[in-house]
Amino acid sequence: MTALLNGAALVLIFNLFALNALLSNTALAADVEYRLPSSVTPTFQSIHLDIDPDKPNYSGTTDIEVTVNTPTKRVGFYQHDLSIISAALIKGDEVLSLDVTQSDFDINWGAAETLIEPGKYTLQITFEGKVNTSSDGMYLSRFEDSNYIFTQFEDMHARKAFPSFDEPIFKIPYQMTISAPAHQVVVSNTPVETETVSDGVKTVTFEKTKPMPTYLIAYTVGPFDSTEMEGLSVPGRIYVPKGYDDKTKFVIKHTPEILASLEDFFGIKYPYKKLDFVAVPNFTHGAMENVGLITYRDSLLLLADNPSVTERSAPLNVIAHELAHQWFGNLVTMAWWDDLWLNEAFASWAASHTMKELYPELNYADRLVQEGAFGADASPTVKPVKKVVKRQPDVMDGLGLNYSKGESILQMIESLIGTENFRKGVRNYMKTHSWGNTVADDLWRALDGVSDFNLSAMMKAYLEQPGYPVIHITDGGKVTQSRFHYAGASVEEQTWAIPLKLTYQVNNEIKSEIVFIDKTTTVLPQLAEADWVYPNDNATGYFRWSVPQKQLDNLLANIDALNKREKKNVLYNYQALLNADEVGVDSVMKVLNTLSGDDDPAVTIAAVGVLQEFDYLVNDNNDEAYAALLNKTYMPLLDALTLNQQDTDSSDVMRLRNQLYGLLGMYADSEMLVKKSEKLAKQYIADTTSVPSGIAATAIAIATKNSAKENSEKWFADLLGAFKKAQLPNVKRTLLYSMRFDDKELVFKMLDLALTDNVTPANALYMVTRVARNLDDHTLLYQWLNENKEALLKKMPDYHVSSMPEYVSSTCSVENLNMANAFYADIMSKHEGMSRGVEIMQDESQQCLRLKDAFQQDFDNFLASYQS
C-alpha cells in the first residue's frame, strides 16, 4: 500500500522539538571514573605474544605510543588478570619507571616519581598471563585432541589478553607479532609482513592495521586447514579445524555475492586488505566482526554442500551481518559502549536488506523484526537501548534490544523516508566519518539531511527511554497513547512522537495517509466515520494498537485488504493486548480463527505460534480438551503437509510443517505421531542425512519424551553414540540437545554432559537451559545445580554466568520461582552482573504468574466451549 505524507502534520509536530547540541565525533567524553582520562591518549600500539596452545601460560610485551596532553604523575591503561612484570615510559634516552597499581573498572595506574610533562612517549609493558578455558578474551579450545587459541575481545575483553587503552574511542593502528611452535598456523587481522623460524619457534609479524579499536583485534593459533575464497574484492580464506576443509563449499559459494551486494549498498569497497573467516568450535556468540578475521561458531561455516532452504537461512544472514559490520562498526565506530546499538542495529538492518535482495526465497521481507523486541521491551525493569555503561555487564544488559529494537527503529525510518533516501543518508554518514568515531546524533543528522522532516527528536524518544507506546483509537477518531505494559505491571508514563501510517475504509473507499501524534490525546476527524482502521501500514511501526470491537470485526471481515505482514501484525497485536489485560481470550481467538485458515503459510505459521504461546495455561485439568482442539483443527493441516519434506517445498511450508509437528507432538496426545517420531528418530540416528534436521529434532524430542523408562537408557546411549560419531556441528546439536527426559537418572545424565568435553564452555548454559525447559517441576534441576554450581560457573563465559538466571530459571510456577530465589541468593553477589539476571528472571516469572491468574479461567472456558 502507498501512503501520502501529511506535510502539515509533520511541520506541526516537529516544530515542538529542539535538538540538543551534537557531540563531535572526534571529541573524547568528559573524564569520568570508569574510563581512562583524556590526559593521555594512544596513537599506535605494537604487541608481541609468545603463545603455545599446548601450554597454559603465555608472555608478552607491548609498546604503546602515547601523547601526554597535560602534566600528570600517572598513566592509566586497562588489564584484567594479567601479571605486570614491568612498565616504563620512554622518551628518547629517558626512561621513567612506573609503579603499577590496580584500580576499579580494570584500570591500572602507572605512577612516576616525577611529573610527566606533555609530549610524545612510548609506554612499554612486559607481562604474563594464563590462557583461559572459557570463551572470552584469549582462550583455549580443545577440539578432537588438538588445542587451538581463539580470541573474543568484544566488548571489554582485549584487556584480558594484553594491556591496552581498551576503549572504542581510541581508534589507532596496531601491529601484532606472535611467536608460536613452528608447526602451528598463525593468523591475525592483516596479511603477514615477515615470518622467521628458529629453534622450532615461528615468529610471525603482521602488517600494521588501519585505525581500529581494541575489540576488533583478533588472532588464532592452531593446526588449521584452510581454503581460498575466490571472487572477493580482496584475498580471503576460510580457516577450519584440521580435517574439516571439505565442509565449507556452501559458504565459499555465497560469500562473494554477499560482499559485493554490501559494497554496492555502501558505495565504498571493502576497506581492509584481506577477508578471512574462522570456524570456532567453542564460541559464546554467533560470530564476531573482527577486522579481516571474522570468527564464527563452527555450525555456521561447516555445512553440507547444499543445505536445505531452512538450514541455509541462519548462516547466510550471519555472514551478511558480520560483513555489514566492516563498514558500520569497523570503518565507522561508536565512541562508547552506550551506542553499541549503532553497530548492531545497522548490521542487522543491512543483513536483512541483503537477504531480501539476494535470497527472496527465504522470505526475510515477511519478518516482523519488532516482535523479537516487544517482549523484553515491555518489562518494567527494561533499560533504554542507549543507557549508562560503566562495566562489561552493563553492555550485555538487554543486549538483544540493540539488535531487534534498533533494527526495528531503522526499518521504521526507512519506511518513512524511502529506501533510496535511507541509502543516501547512510552513504553520507560513512563518507563523513570513515576511520572515525560517532555518536547516535551523527547518524540522525545524516538521515535528517535526506528527509523532509526532522527524525532526531522522534528517534531519541524511542532509543533514550525504555519501552514503547500503545495506541488506542476510539469512537469519533480519538487517539490516545500510553506506555505499553503487561497486566499488573507498573511503569512510568511516557510519550513518543509516533508515525501512524493509517489505512482505513470510509464509504467503501480505502484511504492511506501518514500522521504523527506526540500528545497523550489527539483527535483525527477523518477516522470518525471509518468502517475499519488499520494504523500500521506494512507493519513497520514500533507500537501496539487497538480499535473498537466493531471496527475489529469489520477489519477481520475485510482481512484480505491487508498484506501478510499486516495480517500477522493484527494477530500478534491482539495477543499482546491480551497480555496487557486490555482484551479477552475471546478477542484473540476470534483473530486466530480468522487467520489460521489463511492461504499463505506465513500467516498460518503466525497463528500456530500464537496458539503455542498459551502453553503456560495448559495443565492436567485441561490438557485433554486442548488435545481435542489441536486434533480437530490443526492435525488435518499437518496431515495435508505430511512429515515428508520435498525439494519443491517453500521455506514457509517447511517452517509450518516443523511448527505444527512440534505443537501437535507435544500436546495432541497422538499415539500415531509418537510412533512416527520413534521411526524418524531411529532413522536419523542411523543416517543423519536421511531426515531434515528440523523434523529430526522434533522427532527425537517426541520419542524421548514418550519413551518408557526401560527404553530411555537406550535412547540416551544411542543418541550420545551418534553424537560422538557425527562431524557436522548442526547434526551434533540436533542429536544432543533435542532429548527430553524427566526421570532423575537421565535428567542428571543430561546435566552432567554440560561439565564434560562433549559440551563446550560456550554451550554449557544451553544444555542446562534445555533441561530446565523440559521440566515442569525444577526440583531435580536445583538439586543438580546445588551439587555442581562451582564447576558449572567456572566453566561458563562471564556473559553466561550473569545471564544464567534469566535463561535457566524464568518460570511460570511459584514453586520453581521459590527454588530459584533460594539458589541465587547465595551466589549472585559473587558474580558481576548476576543480580541483574535475577531481577529479569523474577520480573518475567511474576509476569507469567500474573497472566496465568488473569486468564486461566477464560482459557478453560474457551476450551470447554470449543468442545460443546
Image (cartoon, grey):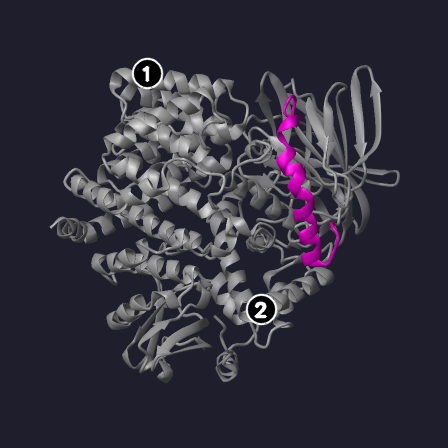
- Other-residue count near label 2 (Cα within 10 Å), few / some / many at <14 / 14–19 / ≥20: some
Q: Residue at x 71, y 28 (%)?
A: 226
Label 1 crowd (10 A; few <14 / some 14-19 / many >=20) = some
Tell me if residue 539 comes above or below residue 56 in the rendering.
below
Location of residue 236 with respect to 613 vertically, above or below:
above
Q: Is 584 placed above or below 358 here?
A: below
Magenta segment's dominant SS is helix
x then y, percent, for residue 160: 62, 34
Residue 632 percent coordinates (x, y): 22, 45
Indicate the position of residue 40 as horizontal and vertical percent values.
72, 49
- Most extreme residue toward the left, as rendered? 868
Question: Helix or strand or loop: what does disc 1 sit on?
Answer: helix
Determine if the magenta segment contains residue 261: yes
Q: Nearer the viewer, residue 165 or 265?
A: 265
Residue 187 figure quarter: top right
Residue under pointer 1: 713
Identified by mark 2, the residue type is Gly
Where residue 252 appears, as percent x and y from the top left, is: 67, 37
What's the amino acid at mark 1?
Answer: Glu
Name the residue beneath numbered marker 2: 418
Q: Is residue 346 left or right of residue 436?
A: left
Residue numbers of the magenta segment: 241-270
Find out whether residue 809 is within the magenta segment: no
The answer to whether residue 294 shows anywhere in this view is no
